[in-house]
Image: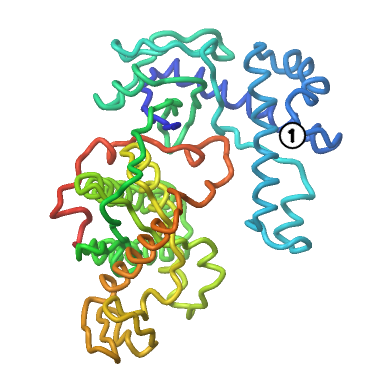
Amino acid sequence: MKLVVQIRLLPTPVQAAALEATLRVCNEAATWVGGVAFDKGVKRPFALREHTYGEVRARWGLGAQAALHVIKKTCDAYATLKANLKAGNLGRPGSERYRRATEKPVAFRPDGAQPFDDRMLSWQIPERRISIWTVCGRVKDVEFTASPEQLATLALYRRGESDLAYQDGMWFLLATCEVPEAPLNTDPADFLGIDLGIVNIATTSDGEIMAGRELNRFRVRERKLRTKLQKKNTPSAKRRLKKRRRKEARRAKDINHKIAKHVVAEAERTGRGIALEDLTGIRERVRLRKPQRATHASWAFAQLGSFIAYKARRAGAPVVYVDPAYTSRTCAECGHIDRANRVSQAWFACRSCGFVDHADRNGSRNIRARAWELWRRGAQSTAPAPPPRQRGGAGHKRSITASDARCASPGLPVPGS
């Protein structure tokens, strides 16, 4: 399976200037290539080279490998756009958002990520140095920092290209690694059901509740601060907004990694599979009052599910996705379904047999039972399709970060639990 190891570069000011110039030139060339592809209707790498390769090399002075990567990067962007349009992520055909996406060529930010292959980038992993091609010539001895786990993964499994990225004043390399998967456990002893929610981020069928009270308070505080700074609209307020813009996303990603690692470790330890809800399209199906919308849309449940899925693949634990319909209204003891069973957000009380339990734990037990039934009928380990690949980030692969390198203790998977 493919993973992405994200390492941070520590370039000198001279080296950083060369890297910045390289991104600027490559993205300017890619934007021009995108316009040619749009005008001529040619969006496949080999065909597009005939129209753009010579001009890219002559006009921007790029090397052969860099020019090829610029063209391929543009084609990847059009492939991502096509996949998003097909999936309905940009609205229905004829809508304003759909038209805006299709009536103009793709363009790239000046600091958009740029791929490098082994001809353009060489690694000295023990010395924590890289040598990289730039428009200013080959830059050698660029320092980088990484954890021992990341260094070991790089040394053993690094394959293919790496993306140079610039985010919030920091330089990163996203290195692709081909990590072997563990043999799939085809005879699980049982399944560990996972119920996802807003108040309690994840609840297992074993009764473990990973609450999000502290995180929810943090999100509300951040949302109020953003609103206040946006209304103020002064230069200092804009600087502060820019500095804090990814803080909430980083915190959510860190917690999702910890939850996923804890869940997979428990399933692996007990020889069980993992049962998750198939929440595809949940945001389109659910209708909420206006005060609830921001809270409902702000947590990355798809990210948490994808983290669990890829960590389970590495551990050999099967993952089964089940239909979440009525899991919160169904009694895990007698199977009675009634809307009145859910007496409050926290508690479930069956109107038929009198069974009382925590509502999320009852739901996770229903998810476990459905997964076990699917597995007995011959269902294989499955997962929803991954999002379309997007150049300039690690969304199309799975990244090993500091959260992956830490073990989540059984008693503290998330703050507030």
Q: Is residue 371 left or right of residue 24?
A: left
Position in image of residue 188 (x %, y %): 30, 49
Q: Is residue 278 above or below residue 59?
A: below
Q: Is residue 39 above or below residue 88?
A: above
Q: How is the image coloured?
A: rainbow
Q: Is residue 152 left or right of residue 409?
A: right
How many numbered circles does the render carry? 1
* Picture quarter with the N terminus: top left
* Picture quarter with the C terminus: bottom left
Which residue bears the numbered disc 1? 34
Q: Residues within 10 Å of mark 1 (few under 14, many from 20)?
A: many
Q: Residue furthest front?
A: 377
Q: Is residue 268 above or below residue 230?
A: above
- The residue depicted at 64 percent of the width and 42 percent of the height is 80
Q: Nearer the viewer, residue 158 or 144?
A: 158
Amino acid type at circle 1 is Gly
- The residue depicted at 74 percent of the width and 19 percent of the height is 56
- The residue depicted at 60 percent of the width and 33 percent of the height is 110
Q: Residue furthest left?
A: 411
- The residue depicted at 67 percent of the width and 11 percent of the height is 64
